[in-house]
Amino acid sequence: MKKPELLAPAGDMEKLQMAIAYGADAVYVGGKEFSLRANAKNFDLPELKQAIAYAHSKNVKVYVSVNIFANNRDFDGLHEYLSVLKEINADAVIVADLGVINVARQIPGLEIHISTQANVTNYQSAALYKELGAGRVILARELSFEEIKEVNEHKAIETEVFIHGAMCVSYSGRCLLSNYMAQGRDANRGDCAQPCRWKYHLVEELRPGEYMPVYEDERGTHILNSKDLCMIDHIPQLVASGVTSLKIEGRMKTAYYVAMVTKIYREALDDYFTDPAFYTSKKDYYMKELDRTGNRGFITGFFENKAIDGQNLSNTIYNNSQEFVGIVEAYDASTGFALVEQRNKFSQGDELEIISPKGSFKQIITDMYDIEGDPLQSAPHPQQMLRIKFTKSVDKFDIMRIMDKQT
């Protein structure tokens, strides 16, 4: 069995660097144009060139999302944009719209991946996209293990599946609810308002203004609000299904989220291919770590034929049992001090966990200074640069988080 690619999200340069540092084989990014997730920072063309060069220097691939559903006006400049992506060595473009595919395949050597937005649910569709010039399809989220395996048994094309992150109430993200509820904020053009996360009540036609709860809770209910996908317990089935790439959702998530989720899936994949029994023995650890990242509760989606207990009816707040407080920028081995960019408040006396791609250790913070050398009791200002002494060596991109109160 071949080890699948681990594909991580990168909403900006920092997240790209974190995904790579923590074990991604490939990352997917969005440009300022023609991409869904319009509210992510995204990359302009010079930034894309820099990001691709950086990733390639680490032997990591970069796939660029060009996955809007295009209107006629969107084709102005599209060919030129795709040509530049080829020139700066993007490893593939992710597309959904047939018109965009038609333009992309006119550019020699440009690898095309078909977005999950295209709703590929069967091997016949996969084969047709191959005839149109695609090298990979990102399968619809609604497929089971057996259906994915059947697509792969026909050996038509490379396949990719989502394994972790936010789920959408609509069919593989093809949603019109945002357009209708949020004055033209088009989910299929990168501007989803996420109305599936809103609270809803029932109003009877002849009794306007009288709001009846759909679920008996004084706060209302979130009837469309899906739990998050998590497939960490099912690495063997994913591998057995024959997929080429395992994809983590989250271009809008934090750098901490990207790093930690990538790290845990990297460990799980490597552990499974080293020793399946060792992977099995670590399942509780994997899940505990993933539960410490922001989530709405976990489900396995449709992989086991249909989603069970898939909606979070109480709220849309992310569960997050630990707080990301800083990231290491540089380390001076001669003094034991590191330059740290602070992200959330912490103080002297706090016990922190320092996490790297290779492992972790714990320590109580005792020596902390601002960049001018003045001693600090606490670090209250986001993105303040600090000098902190560590009991062990650290590296750039190591993460600091406050220890879980339960550990």
Image (cartoon, grey):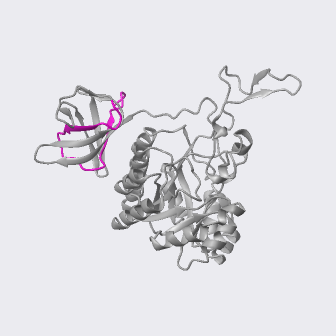
Where 17 sits versus 210, above or below?
below
Q: Looking at the rendering, which quadrant does residue 377 occupy?
A: top left
Name the residue nearer the viewer: 282 or 81.
Answer: 81
Name the residue nearer the viewer: 264 or 135.
Answer: 135
Residue drawn at 80 percent across, 21 percent down: 209
Residue drawn at 72 percent across, 39 percent down: 181
Where 10 sits versus 241, above or below?
above
Q: Residue furthest right?
A: 206
**Image location of residue 182, percent across then percent down:** 69, 39
Q: Is residue 38 magenta?
A: no
> What residue span does the magenta drawing correspond to?
381-407
Q: Does the magenta stretch include residue 398?
A: yes
Name the residue nearer the viewer: 127 or 99.
Answer: 99
Q: Looking at the rendering, which quadrant does residue 340 occupy?
A: top left
Q: Looking at the rendering, which quadrant does residue 61 occupy?
A: bottom left
Residue 284 can be seen, yes or no: no
**Image location of residue 405, percent across then percent down:** 36, 27
**Image location of residue 307, percent across then percent down:** 65, 46
Q: Residue furthest left?
A: 334
Left or right: 382, with 254 as reference point? left
Where 155 sits versus 328, above or below?
below
Q: Which residue lies furthest to the bottom in this view?
A: 108
**Image location of residue 217, percent across then percent down:** 67, 22
Left or right: 60, with 363 as reference point? right
Left or right: 255, with 295 as reference point? left
- Image quadrant containing the C terminus: top left
Left or right: 116, with 17 as reference point? right
Residue 126 can be seen, yes or no: yes
- Magenta: main secondary structure: loop
